[in-house]
Image (cartoon, rainbow, N blue to C red):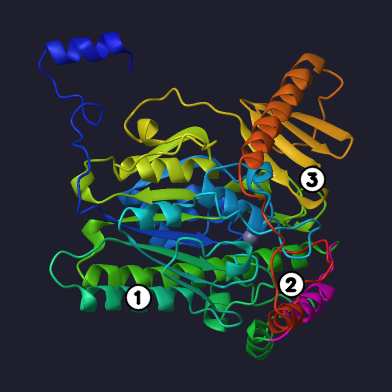
Amino acid sequence: MRPGILGLLAALGLAVVGLSCRKPVEPPRPNLVLISIDTLRADHLTAYGYERATSPEISRLANEGVLFEQAFSQSPKTATSHMSLFTGVYPPAHRVANWGERRNRRLSDDVPTLATLLAQSGYRTEAYTNGGNVSARLGFDQGFDVYQEHRGADPAFEGASRALDRFVRDDRGVPAPFFLFIHTFEVHDPYVPPAEFADQFVDPSYSGDIVGSQAELERLAGGGNYWARNAEFWSRVDRDDPADIQHLKDLYDAEILFTDSQFAAFNENLRSLGLEDETIVVVLSDHGEEFLEHGGFLHNALFQEILHVPLIFRFPPSLGLASGRRIPNVVRLVDVVPTLLEVLGLPVPDHLQGESLLPLVEGDEAFARPVFSQWLAGGRIVALRDGDWKYIRIKRQEQLFDLSTDPQESLDRLSARQEVLARLQERVDEIIGESYAFAETQTKARPPELEQETREQLESLGYLGENPENP
Ligand SMILES: [Zn+2]
């Protein structure tokens, strides 16, 4: 909406909803629940147009909130992506990579995270995670009063739900707001959902070798060495058999349905405790997943199926923000922290590379920013989306795609569009340069410190291996 039109509306005495009516947020501020469902492709959610009913509770959240149709991750790797989400800066600025990647380090103590900023503003901060690459040892615990890492079974939603009960039980007088971070690997491979959820999508006539029986699902879903279970699962896949590829998707979709049911149970508790109307709920993922679109599985590339993630906010009615809106603009996970800080009426630090999406939520349609993504292994795998153009550089090999005519990223336009290439190369160099300049101002980040016991525990889980498909 242009200023001239705003002025005209004001002169006519008409309310301009969202732009001029929203009151500043004063304490007590809303609670915040941030849910990361690891490895969740946006396009396998019903709310993002998927033909299957994989996610009724997430659809409900979207109907009551604001859904970003084109949100993109800053890395295909779990630790790197989550750290960009938490800090609002790009991977070369925080430099936190997955376990086992070279030159890995934990987050510098100087870099503020969403949790440290909310803790400074009086929030109680607790995290219930599946650990692994979202580990306290990489600096993810900074700013949290409680940081729980559950491995094996998946009680992250249950732990968070018990925290809700405790918050309500312990409140005396004016309660402090809380920030809960929930992270689950349930959708991550190996795809071994509970049998009752697998039954919803698996073709009963499937006769391939991938797990299908309840007993096999239970065994592979259990604890023990991640890589051993992972290797057994993938050894059964015939990548040339379309029935196997469909079966993988069926199991993956069943994992989404299972996770959605856990989210529904958590939401039910939020409602029953009377907290729903006082709490911002955000659902997102750190990256998607590939099913042979570009010849691979898992998340080891920077194509759209791996970087396109869900991003949905539900705001308390008292904030007067939109509900039931879908926003088509291209946005980024680094935009989440500045958005939440602005929504909560808290100062947004100057160094953030993301930008608040609140103007978009309030109706400004002009937001258009480039999306930078990086796989930190070796430091040289980057992608930049700028408008309809997508540039990918792996060491010295470059690709350029026109997403307006080629959303599948199948036709390399590198030689045809040299002027576009030069512009995107320059922008990548600028982002890396400004990221390094920021990193220089921080206390030098150190390698993750591992006591022997912790090292053995991580090795037994497979997290310290040199496997290039480190999740
Ligand atoms: Zn991940």
The residue that label 1 is drawn on is: 163
Separation (CA) of disc 3 from disc 1? 38 Å
Cβ of disc 2 within 8 Å of ligand 1? no
User: What residue is shown at x 74% (from left), y 48% (from top)?
Assistant: 375
Vertical relation: 415 (above or below) 353: above
Q: Which amino acid type is marked by label 3?
A: Gly
The residue that label 2 is drawn on is: 463
Quarter that holds the N terminus: top left
User: What residue is shown at x 50% (from left), y 73% (from top)?
Assistant: 258
Q: Is residue 168 magenta?
A: no
Quarter that holds the C terminus: bottom right
Lower position in the chain sequence, tag 3 or tag 2:
3
> Helix, strand, or loop for circle 3?
helix
The residue that label 3 is drawn on is: 379
Vertical relation: 8 (above or below) 409: above
Residue 132 percent across, percent down from the top left: 64, 71
Q: Which amino acid type is marked by label 1?
A: Ala
Which segment did they paint magenta?
Answer: 224-239
Residue 47 percent across, percent down from the top left: 45, 51
| Left or right: where 174 falls relative to 396 | left
Separation (CA) of disc 1 from disc 2? 28 Å
Q: Which amino acid type is marked by label 2?
A: Tyr
| Left or right: where 259 falls relative to 263 | right
> Helix, strand, or loop for circle 1?
helix
Give residue 146's quadrant in the image.
Answer: bottom left
Which residue is nearer to you in this view: 256 or 119? Answer: 119
| Left or right: where 232 falls relative to 65 | right
Vertical relation: 167 (above or below) 152: above
